[in-house]
Image (tube, rainbow, N blue to C red):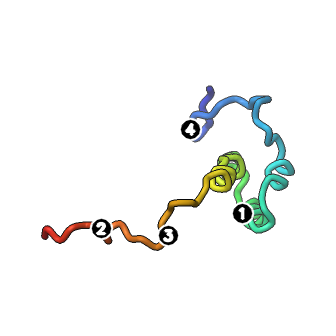
Amino acid sequence: MTTAPSGVPHSPPSSLHPLRTIRDIRESLSEDQRRHFDAELSDTEIEALPEMLHRWVTLSNDGFEEFLLSQPFEGLEFGARSYDKQSDTE
């Protein structure tokens, strides 16, 4: 692990990471996300580029969408509020 000039530690590039280029990042995003990525990329200063790219790699590779799609929604009560079942002890 090394430290960037900003003092933020980061890992050296690894061949284990599947996203190696800006094209890889773009292709891993949905069309809507890709538009946001392109807009942010065009407005990002050169010095901030590594941090911005790292954030998008993390977003595109975090597995959250796969997690949501793999979890059944059976048994969940949508629209319930956390305070609905509280007793009136106040």
Q: Are marks 2 and 1 in contact (CB under 8 Å)?
A: no
Q: Amino acid at mark 1?
A: Glu
**Residue 8, which numbered label?**
4
Image quadrant occupied by the C terminus = bottom left
**Residue 70, which numbered label?**
none
Local crowd at mark 3 within 10 Å, few (<14), some, or many (≥20)? few
Q: For marks 2 and 1, give the one nearer the viewer.
A: 2
Q: Amino acid at mark 4?
A: Val
Q: Amino acid at mark 2?
A: Lys
Going 79% across and 50% down the picture, which residue do you hit? 25
The answer to whether residue 73 shows anywhere in this view is yes
What whole-number distance in Å separates the C-alpha atoms at marks 2 and 1?
A: 44 Å
Seen in the image, is 60 located left or right of residue 22?
left
Residue at the extreme top of the image, as rendered: 1
Q: Which residue is mark 1?
A: 40
Going 60% across and 31% down the picture, which residue do you hit? 3
Going 65% across and 47% down the picture, which residue do you hit? 62
What whole-number distance in Å separates the C-alpha atoms at marks 2 and 4?
A: 45 Å
Of the numbered discs 2 and 1, the one sitting upstream in the chain is: 1
Image: 32 above or below 47: below
Q: Which residue is mark 3?
A: 78
Q: For marks 1 and 3, give the one nearer the viewer.
A: 3
Image location of residue 65, percent across then percent down = 67, 55
Of the pair 90 and 34, the residue shown nearer to us: 90
Q: Which residue is mark 2?
A: 85
What whole-number distance in Å separates the C-alpha atoms at marks 2 and 3?
A: 14 Å
Q: For marks 2 and 4, give the one nearer the viewer.
A: 2
Local crowd at mark 1 within 10 Å, few (<14), some, or many (≥20)? some
What whole-number distance in Å separates the C-alpha atoms at marks 3 and 4?
A: 40 Å
Circle 3: element type? loop
